Image (cartoon, rainbow, N blue to C red):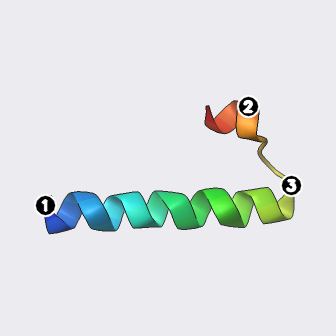
C-alpha cells in the first residue's frame, strides 16, 4: 500500500472516532 493512502486512511479513522465521541455523526452517516 502507498504510505500516502495509509496516512489518509488513518486520518479518516481518527476523524470518525473523534466525531463519534462528540456525537456529531452517527454510524449511518459514516456508512
- The residue at which mark 1 appears reads as 2
Please report whichever mark, 2 or 1, sits nearer to the chain's N-terminal start.
Answer: 1
Q: What SS does tag 2 mark?
A: helix
Question: With respect to residue 29, does 3 lie above or below?
Answer: below
Q: Which mark is residue 28?
A: 2
Say few, some or many: other residues with alpha carbon within 10 Å of mark 3 (under 14 / 14 to 19 / 20 or more). Answer: few
Q: Position of residue 27 (x, y in %)?
A: 73, 40
Name the image quarter holding the C terminus: top right
What is the quadrant of residue 28 in the picture? top right
Q: Position of residue 6 (x, y in %)?
A: 28, 63
Residue at 14% over, 58% down: 1
Q: What SS does tag 1 mark?
A: loop
Residue at 56% over, 67% down: 14
**From mark 1 to mark 3, how far is it between C-alphas?**
31 Å
What is the quadrant of residue 18 in the picture? bottom right
Say few, some or many: other residues with alpha carbon within 10 Å of mark 1 (under 14 / 14 to 19 / 20 or more). Answer: few
Q: Which mark is residue 23?
A: 3
What is the quadrant of residue 7 in the picture? bottom left
Amino acid at each position: 500500500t502507498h504510505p500516502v493512502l495509509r496516512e489518509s486512511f488513518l486520518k479518516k479513522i481518527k476523524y470518525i472516532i473523534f466525531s463519534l465521541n462528540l456525537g456529531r455523526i452517527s454510524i449511518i452517516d459514516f456508512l
